[in-house]
């Protein structure tokens, strides 16, 4: 800790991203990346934007990313003024915490959820209160209704559990908190959930966040967006233009636009992940694992007779990495990304060998 650090830097407990090891022949099932490549139309769009000599890269991108906003608006039957885009959903969320969740009352979110939420609270000085999940790791909507708060943020499906909150319960929470912004972080919704975006037409306090990192196979491009009432979007634009006017580069804008437009490829790739997930759940259940219901591109599993940390270590020794969280209530679970069918088959075989 340097004497040059500000008090903010001293007090922070930074988010720890999933490991990105440089190991040959690795089966990487720890960061929820999509096993399929992005749509070929994404690659074609990026190549076209580059041109033969890449001369366009000398020019700044459109600071408003109007091409992408129009594509997203068309996809979800909203107006471009209801769309905000940023450098991955993490940046979108960061601006939401600053623009919409920094109030006198504490915000609410589950005690087990995306671990960036408390980090943003620390970074921006946002008071918060965590709400315990039920014993089965589900969210009880009643816990978020008629509670004094400065805002609510819920990942749906939740991370790292993968459990889904029904759309009717999301609307119930939004309706019960008309004076608070309710943020629904839908990073994984395309693998078995129903988006709350249509509800934004009825609830001006509801904001829905998406990422192209998961179901659009674009974790390397860094594009996220939010959809909600124009007043919410305007607040985000004010913060964004006070921080970085050009969050998306030229290649990200055209690549993301192509990904949003190729609905057929998106649906086929998502269905492949869902089918592989269900097959892996069955295989792990046969090995004695308890697997939580998942609507995401990962599963959350534990074995009643084997320590999770030891299992993660044994897998790593065999060139498979999964995510293990050393946190209360979930330290005996492994979060396993749904890889390709071949990768998941290898995982099942190696787990069978370890357990035997």
Image (cartoon, rainbow, N blue to C red):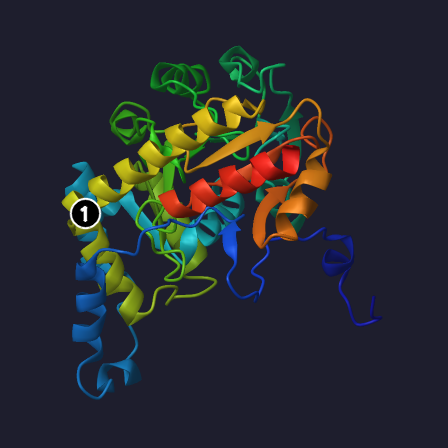
Q: Is residue 290 left or right of residue 248?
A: right
Q: Is residue 132 visible?
A: yes
Which residue has dot 1 on it? 265
User: Which residue is at the front of the view, 279 or 111?
Assistant: 279
Relative to 73, residue 113 above or below: above
Q: Residue at x 64, y 26 (%)?
A: 303
Q: Which picture quadrant has residue 301?
A: top right
> Measured along the vertical axis of the image, is residue 106 above or below residue 171?
below
Please tell me how many numbered marks the rendered image carries.
1
Q: Nearer the viewer, residue 332 or 51?
A: 332
Position of residue 208 measured from the top left corner of the image (x, y, whole percent)? 37, 36
Identify the residue shown where x is 69% and y is 35%. 308
The image position of residue 45, as x and y in percent, is 18, 67
The local secondary structure at tag 1 comes to helix
Q: Is residue 276 above or below residue 94?
A: above
Front-lying residue, 80 or 170: 170
Residue 142 in picture, x, y percent from top left: 52, 11
Image quadrant where one finds the N terminus: bottom right
- Image quadrant assignment for residue 352: top right
Quadrant placement of the C terminus = top right
Dot 1 surroundings within 10 Å: few (below 14), some, or many (20 or more)? Answer: some
- Residue 341, given in percent of the width and then of the height, sits at 37, 43
The answer to whether residue 79 is visible is: no
- Is residue 14 depicted above or below 298 in this figure? below
From the viewer's perspective, is 230 left or right of 99? left
Q: Residue at x 38, y 66 (%)?
A: 245
- Looking at the rendering, which quadrant does residue 282 occupy? top left
């Amino acid at each position: 800790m340097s004497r040059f650090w500000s008090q903010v830097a001293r007090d922070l407990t930074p988010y720890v991203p999933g490991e990105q090891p440089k190991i040959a022949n690795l089966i990487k099932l720890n960061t929820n990346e999509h096993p399929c490549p992005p749509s070929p139309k994404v690659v074609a769009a990026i190549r076209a934007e580059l041109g033969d000599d890449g001369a366009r890269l000398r020019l700044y991108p459109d600071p408003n990313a109007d091409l992408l906003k129009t594509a997203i608006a068309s996809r979800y039957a909203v107006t471009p003024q209801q769309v905000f885009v940023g450098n991955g959903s993490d940046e979108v969320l960061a601006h939401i915490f600053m623009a919409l969740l920094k109030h006198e009352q504490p915000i609410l979110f589950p005690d087990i959820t995306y671990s960036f939420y408390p980090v943003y609270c620390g970074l921006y000085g946002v008071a918060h209160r965590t709400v315990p999940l039920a014993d089965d790791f589900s969210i009880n909507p009643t816990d978020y209704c008629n509670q004094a708060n400065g805002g609510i943020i819920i990942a749906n499906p939740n991370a790292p559990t993968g459990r889904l909150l029904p759309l009717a319960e999301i609307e119930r929470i939004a309706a019960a908190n008309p004076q608070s912004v309710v943020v629904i972080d839908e990073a994984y919704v395309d693998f078995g959930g129903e988006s709350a975006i249509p509800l934004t037409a009825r609830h001006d306090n509801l904001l829905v966040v998406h990422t192209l990192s998961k179901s659009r196979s674009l974790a390397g491009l860094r594009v996220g967006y939010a959809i909600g009432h124009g007043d919410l979007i305007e607040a985000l634009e004010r913060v964004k233009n006070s921080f970085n006017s050009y969050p998306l580069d030229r290649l990200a804008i055209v690549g993301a636009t192509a990904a949003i437009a190729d609905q057929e490829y998106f649906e086929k790739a998502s269905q492949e992940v869902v089918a592989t997930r269900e097959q892996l759940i069955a295989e792990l259940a046969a090995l004695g694992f308890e697997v939580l219901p998942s609507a995401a591109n990962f599963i959350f599993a534990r074995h009643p007779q084997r320590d999770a940390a030891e299992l993660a270590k044994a897998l790593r020794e065999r060139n498979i990495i999964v995510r293990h969280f050393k946190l209360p209530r979930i330290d005996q679970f492994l979060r396993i990304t749904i890889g390709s069918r071949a990768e998941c088959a290898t995982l099942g075989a190696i787990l069978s060998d370890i357990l035997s």
